[in-house]
Image (cartoon, rainbow, N blue to C red):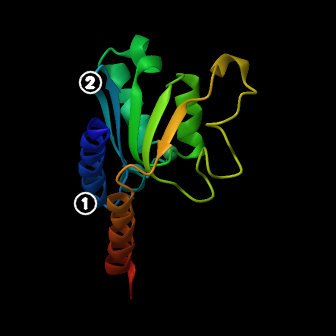
Amino acid sequence: MDSYKKYMLECIKLAKQALANGNPPVGSLLVFENKIIGRGIESGKSSGDITQHAEILAVKDALANGYRDVLEKSVMFSTHEPCIMCSYLIRHHQISKLILGVSVPFVGGQSSEFKILETENVPKWGNKPEIEMGILREECEILNEEFKDYLLKHFQH
Ligand SMILES: [Zn+2]
């Protein structure tokens, strides 16, 4: 359990980097056998490219690092519930465990009406991943507040 917190703190660090660049504060990691194999810093907003979500970037980082074959045995940590776009990628790679901070309204792959993370109706996706929600929840909620402050500061007139 302490290792969950350790990796979530690392995600929060990445999320703060995202925020510093004007992005929603989301940070993600992939961990295999107690080793970080991929890191993702949300950059959809700063790049203008919606696919640059933290979870997708963490998977791409792991792929670039040569860990394609162990993705399904790795654990994804993320400050936020993966959106439906990222959830598709997670299911495609059959990542079997997700440790998350806070849920995401409307477009979360578990909590919204689009339950990409939970469906068992896509045969090639196999079993749905185990999900633990609420690790360092308060710290992750503070990130959300900081993003709101950021938006107010930069876009108020
Ligand atoms: Zn996403």
Q: Looking at the rendering, which quadrant does residue 30 occupy?
A: top left
Q: Which residue is mark 2?
A: 34
Q: Which residue appears farthest toward the front when viewing the image?
A: 1
Q: Residues within 10 Å of mark 2 (few under 14, many from 20)?
A: few
Secondary structure beneath disc 1? helix
Real-space CA distance between mark 2 and mark 1, rounded to the nearest whole angstrom: 28 Å
Q: Which residue is mark 1?
A: 20
Give me the residue at 39% from left, 88% from top: 157
Residue 108 in the image, given as x and y percentages of width and height: 58, 50
User: Total marks drawn?
Assistant: 2
Give me the residue at 30% from left, 59% from top: 19
Q: Which residue appears farthest toward the top when viewing the image?
A: 69
Secondary structure beneath disc 2? loop
Residue 89 in the image, given as x and y percentages of width and height: 54, 31
Give me the residue at 36% from left, 58% from top: 140
Tag 1: amino acid: Ala
Residue 36 in the image, given as x and y percentages of width and height: 26, 28
- Between disc 2 and disc 1, the foreground one is 2
**Mark with earlier residue (2, 1):** 1
- Is disc 2 in contact with disc 1, using a CB cutoff of under 8 Å? no
Give me the residue at 35% from left, 16% from top: 67
Tag 2: amino acid: Asn
In the image, residue 6 sits, relative to residue 20, either above or below, namely above
Q: Which residue appears farthest toward the right when viewing the image?
A: 121
Q: From the viewer's perspective, is 24 left or right of 37?
A: right
Residue 72 in the image, given as x and y percentages of width and height: 47, 19
Toward the viewer: 127 or 148?
127
